[in-house]
Amino acid sequence: ECREENIERGKDDLEREFKRNNIAITPELLQSTAQRQRLGSVDDLYAAIGYGGVSLSKIVQRIKEEQMRTHKEQQAVQQASADPEEA
């Protein structure tokens, strides 16, 4: 099946690109990425990547930006809680 081949190709490409960019693959991340691309399922995401309908580089860039923003927010919270309160 053409769709099955696209799913397999898309999954391989996505996993390779995520590993190359040190992005941990989680079911939640895959599902949110599919939803963000307005796709019904993770398999639809893989198929779209496999046939070139979705840009893998844009997906990776957006995820890295989100992770960076989350990391900065966590650092700000940790820093705020580590600062001694003035009495």
Image (cartoon, helix red, strand yellow):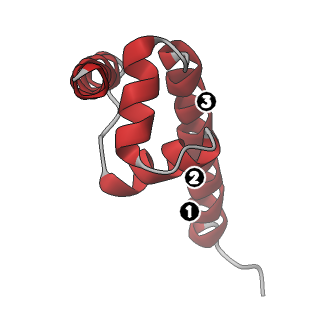
Of residue 44 and residue 64, the one placed in the foreground of this image is 44
Which residue is identified by label 2?
75
Note whether 81 is above or below 35 in the view shown: below
Residue furthest out toward the front: 1
Seen at 64% across and 73% down, the residue is 84
Of residue 87 and residue 23, the one placed in the foreground of this image is 23
Task: State the CA–CA distance, disc 3 to disc 2.
Answer: 20 Å
User: Which dot marks residue 62?
Assistant: 3
Crowding at dot 2, Cα within 10 Å, few <14 / some 14-19 / many 20+, comes out as few
Which residue is identified by label 1?
78
Image position, residue 4 (x, y; %):
23, 28
Labels 1 and 2 touching (C-beta < 8 A): yes
> Looking at the image, how many numbered discs can be counted on the residues?
3
Q: Amino acid at mark 2?
A: Gln
Is 81 left, or right, of 87 in this rendering? Answer: left
User: Which dot marks residue 30?
Assistant: none
Q: Amino acid at mark 1?
A: Gln
Q: Nearer the viewer, mark 3 or mark 1?
A: 3
Task: State the CA–CA distance, disc 1 to disc 2.
Answer: 5 Å
Image position, residue 41 (x, y; %):
43, 50
Note whether 6 is above or below 64 in the view shown: above
